[in-house]
Amino acid sequence: MNQTLVTRRGTLMLPTYLPDATRGVVRSIDADDVRACGIDALVMNVFHLMQRPGSSTIAALGGLHRMSGWSGPIVTDSGGFQAYSLIRQHGRGTLNEQGLNFTPEGADRRFQLTPEKSVQLQLAYGADVVICLDDCTHAADSLVEQEHSVRRTTAWARRCKAEFERQLAQRRKHDGRPLLFAVIQGGASPTLRRQCAEALLEIGFDGYGYGGWPLASDGSLLREMLALTRELIPSTLPLHALGIGHPDHVATCARMGYDLFDSALPTRDARAGRLYRFADQAAQPTIDGPWRQFIYLEDERHLKGTAPIDAGCDCHTCQTASLGYLYHLRAIGDGLFARLATIHNLRFMSRLVMRLRSERAPA
């Protein structure tokens, strides 16, 4: 299994969890807070950023790193999943061989996103890991739709790589070379997953991502497809479990050999009052058996709680705030609650991947 991923803005220890800073910010906290949580890289989304604040504004503000105050690696998602939601589920656009045409809710104009434009924007924004535009599907979509998705995703990946190489040839060499990842589609079909993986491997990329919705209709992880996809990609190449961020799922997929994880779930849960902690509340927690717990701050039993969220956690929140105080902040709707809760859940995720790394360490 991979131990590290070298990017132009630093080496990532693997596995690693990347919070979703979708629109250029991890909601409720700033870059210093993120760094203090032990987070090494962020995911941002070109689909959203091209709409707001817009490419000209990002350029005027010096690119994503300067705009957000984040000096570490940034992975930019191409927006394939968002297009799936907007176009396939809500009918607010069209998808063809050339790319995507869509009108976001509340927008007064139509946007176009092609494989070439996606790469151009990601590089212009300063991405350290560029992700190819893909045609995202749900595992329950028909076999015909999955076949179209694989064919289109492969063709788009080829165009993305050609544009990526063309752009790099025109850029300053001393800026360092970003990485290019392709996304493996195929839904729940082992044949199509294999077909997509083999075609993308033949084109050649720096890394790959598991594409498509990773959960079954009952919310369970599509373990067989995830395991197969990891087997299809040589273990020397990094594999990103796109959109996977539930603690249980991160642990499962990291043990399969997945290297990178991203999801808005931990930070969204934090703002909603669902806080994570290790069952043994140890400084070096155990990740076996029933190893994690959720604390729901809406529960009145926390009203006068004097303990921190997790006695073994070294985050700012656990060092300074009791459960009772957090309950109070949430009850009165103070913005400090969102910050403190987000800091803790992110530190939980960074501690989780640190423990999972120890399982990969050579004996």
Image (tube, rainbow, N blue to C red):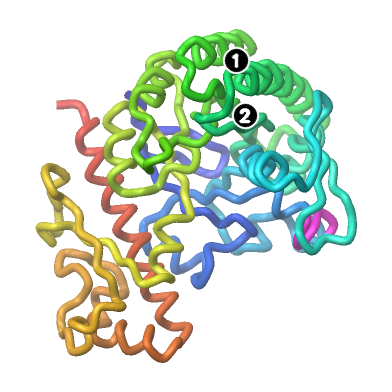
**Which residue is at the front of the view, 165 or 209?**
209
Asked which secondary structure carries label 1, the reply is helix
Left or right placement of residue 78 versus residue 326 in this view: right
Mark 2–mark 1 CB contact (< 8 Å): no
Q: Residue at x 41, y 35 (%)?
A: 216
Q: Can the viewer see residue 127?
A: no
Q: Position of residue 167 (x, y in %)?
A: 79, 30
Picture disc at residue 180: 2
Identify residue for label 1: 200
Q: Position of residue 158 (x, y in %)?
A: 72, 18
- Few, some or many residues within 10 Å of mark 2 (<14, 14–19, 20+): many
Number of marks drawn: 2
Q: Residue at x 39, y 18 (%)?
A: 228
On-image quarter of the C terminus: top left
Picture disc at residue 187: none
**Which residue is at the front of the view, 101 or 182?**
101
Residue 132 among magenta residues: no
Q: Quadrant of residue 267?
A: bottom left
Residue 52 among magenta residues: yes
CA distance separating discs 2 and 1: 12 Å
Q: Pick whichever of labels 2 and 1 is earlier in the sequence.
A: 2
Q: Quadrant of residue 296?
A: bottom left
On-image quarter of the N terminus: top left
The boundaries of the magenta stretch are: 51-56
- What amino acid type should be assigned to the residue bearing mark 1? Leu
